[in-house]
Image: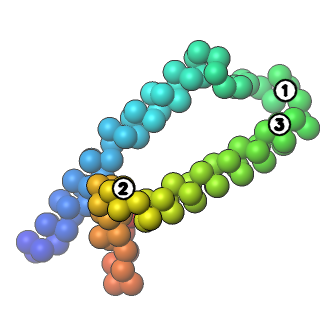
Amino acid sequence: SKTRKNFIVKHIWQTMKAMPGYILLEGVSEYMVEQGWTRCYSAIEDVGWPMYFVYFIVYLVIVELGIYWVHRASHEVKLLYRLSHAQHHVYNSKHKVSPFA
């Protein structure tokens, strides 16, 4: 149906709008690794199992807290909400299930 087609096109468009940001994030991340600004090990033996677990836990805490606060800020800062985050809520309802949200 036309409604279904419009719904799918809207999902695809929303996903495509996010792609430049994800590409930029990956590029900056790779640049930081190549410049030696991060600790990047190709094998666990390079750092040892005890420090691997420490780094793993620290990484998870930083990532989870970072995601939480960025998401919260995107609700609190009206400009962020209007420019980027409001579209995320277009797909959030109890009657719609979407992998694009």
Q: Give percent across and percent down for residue 28.
A: 48, 28
Q: Is mark 2 on a helix, strand or loop?
A: helix
Is residue 36 in view from this perspective? yes
Q: In this view, does 21 lie above or below 9?
A: above
Front label number (1 vs 2)? 2
> Which of 3 and 70 lies nearest the eye of the viewer?
70
Q: What residue type is labelled 1?
A: Val
Q: Which residue is drawn at 87% across and 35% down?
A: 51
Q: Which residue is drawn at 56% across and 23% down?
A: 32
Q: In this view, does 75 lie above or below 52?
A: below
Q: Give percent across and percent down for residue 48.
A: 89, 30
Which residue is denoted by mark 1 in the rendering?
A: 47
Q: Quadrant of the N terminus?
A: bottom left
Q: What residue type is labelled 2?
A: Leu
Q: Residue 52 carries which label?
A: 3
> Which of 71 and 10 lies nearest the eye of the viewer?
71
Disc 1 + disc 3, Cβ < 8 Å: yes
> Which of 47 and 45 lies nearest the eye of the viewer?
47
